[in-house]
Image (cartoon, coloured by chain):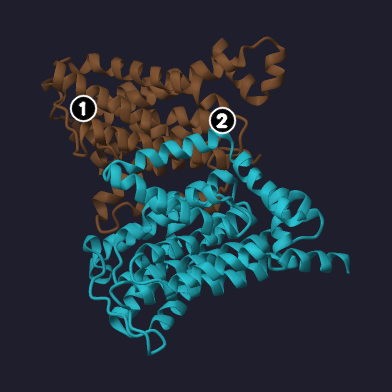
Chain colours: A brown, B cyan
Amino acid sequence: MATILFDGVAYGMLLFVLACGLAVTLGLMNFVNLAHGAFAMAGGYVTVILMDRWGVPFLACLPAAFVAAAALGFVLERTLYLHMYGRSHLDQVLFSIGLVFMAVTAVDWAMGSSQQNIKLPAWLQGRRDVFGMQVGIYRSFIIVICGALALGLQLALTHSRFGSRLRAAVDDARVARGLGIPVSTVFAVTFAVGSGLAGLGGALGTEILGLDPNFPLRFMIYFLIVVTVGGTSGIVGPFVASLLLGVADVAGKYYVPALGAFMVYLVMIAVLVLRPHGLFARPR
Amino acid sequence: MGAARGLARRASWRWPEIVFWLVAFGALLMPAGKYLILNEIAILALFALSLDLILGYAGIVSLGHAAFFGAGAYTAGLLAKHVTGDPLAGLALAMAVATLLGFLTTFLVLRGSDLTRLMVTLGVALVLGELANALPHISGGADGLQGVVMGKLLGRFEFDLFGRTAYAYSLTTLFVLMLLARRIVHSPFGLSLMAIRRNALRAGALGVPVHVRLIAAYTLAAAYAGAAGALLAQTTAFVSLDVFEFHRSADVLLVLIIGGAGWLYGGIAGAVIYKLLQDGIATVTPQYWQFWIGLLLVAFVMVGRQRFVGGLYGLLALARRR
């Protein structure tokens, strides 16, 4: 029971890091980016290539995955996404689906369609007994990293100069621009950081979530659930939603394997029926 | 009086439409050859037409329209396998099941914002896909539903190897449902849907029961999608899990966008263009054609969907003025 809860929390934390960039672009900036998973996949493949082909240690791969995905996000934002901000949701949906298709086939072409594996360093493998509870070391590692990231993000968003600029730009871009806030730079940096975090999540999650070219499509619904169930008023909501989703998914697959992934959808439906605008959001 | 005359004028047949249907039915006189792809085009066109009803007219963006397509396909397949091979009975039952499913899911779909709708429509299709996967003794699981044997159409026409009967059957279904859709879209009900798409708040203020109308439109579209699924199951005598897949929902969205949403024939035009494109690209790179479709989508949106469709409308207006 406790172990399942623990694994669920680790899984949820991982989902949060994967989806938090989307929580900002989709939740705060109201930009539908279905291609978010592609950045996570990029991070995952960067890790696989670095570790397998160049023998880079795992810990050094994590920042590399972040940087690579962030750079990719930055370039795409400046060249393509930039033109999509003011468009209708339908345009944004079509545009990002197009990107997903391209990402999926490009990776399939470059890396093959098979599942990729990485070999974790020995000190991250195995389980340890803590107060009678079986705790996976790698999952504790994930919880620590992702928890720290979540805390840092929340502080950055609410207490830093950049955070207040971002919130101002999101609330009313015109007024923010009038106040001298470089709105498009703020958006670009936010987008890059969000993509980078997704890349980091992809790198961390290779072991747990699996990595193949279909990754962006497989997890699209999870990201959407995190953002919609969490609500669109900050990152606390998505954080709670990720944990809920992680625990529900792990527990569901453990206790009622026949139901499989249904647990997640049941949770989604229940939340939606009770709180149509998400757990924490005010209706807008 | 003026409004009624306006509706009648909008609903009148124009010569390009008549020419199109003559050509489509005329294709049946060709010697055997391209019927299989024509059949696929007709089915895809019907599926896109159903999406047009909710996207082009009611303005609901759906990422999971395959849910109803798949429900129709499995219903028709299972009926043919276990009860009767009569195609029309299968078509009717598939539409009934899809209608019911569409009606039930409206309560989830029509809650919340655009964003919630994206998630829920996608979720509904995924749930059904999971369900079909989890019940292999009914659906055949990953192997697909095998042993579907179709009877003769109307008790006379057998489904032949070249797909001639199949094409005639699909095209006739498309034609009948298109007539119905024209009638609906050009009625006051259809106009009220368009008003909702433009501005739901204002439509409500004018006395349009927004929520009820959206439920009706969504349910209707589900029935159409179910019919398309049934056609696929019956004419190929096979159903597999991929009827529920995200690719199918995304493809139909693309088809409709290529042809232009909101004028009923967009689905047909898009289906023709899409199938020809897919055929062309797939002969060059059979494995990676999806990449070019993605590139096309991105380019399409970047250049401006409105500009494409707007140009088309301009041509139509020009043709009408003459």
In the picture of the structure, the residue carrying the numbered disc 1 is: A138
Give above or below for B159 relative to B196.
Answer: below
Taking A9 as reference, is B214 above or below it? below
Mark 2 chain:
A
Q: Residue B117 carries which label?
A: none
* First in sequence: mark 2 vs mark 1: 2
Q: Where is residue A100 in the image (x, y as percent from the top left)?
A: 39, 37
Local SS, label 2: helix
Distance CA(mark 2)–CA(mark 1)? 39 Å
Is there any visible trace of residue A265 in the rendered image?
no
Q: Where does residue A45 sit, x and y in percent of width and height?
A: 26, 27
Amino acid beneath label 2: Met
Q: Which residue is drawn at 23% across and 39% down?
A: A3
Residue A192 picture quarter: top left
In this figure, what is the number of numbered marks?
2
How many residues crowd around disc 1 within 10 Å: few (fewer than 14), some, or many (20 or more)? many
Foreground residue, B27 or A274? B27
Residue at 51%, 27% (x, y): give it: A81
Estimate the x, y position of residue A194 in percent, counting from the top left.
44, 24
Residue under label 2, please give it.
A84
- Residue B69, image quadrant: bottom left
Q: Residue at coordinates 41% horizontally, 48% vertically from top-left?
A: B277
Q: Where is residue B97 in the image (x, y as percent from the top left)?
A: 46, 73
2 vs 1, front mark: 2
Find numbered disc 1 in the image and state the secondary structure of the residue it sits on.
helix
Q: Which chain carries label 1?
A: A
Residue farthest toward the bottom in the current orientation of the protein: B155
Q: Is residue B229 left or right of residue A24?
A: left
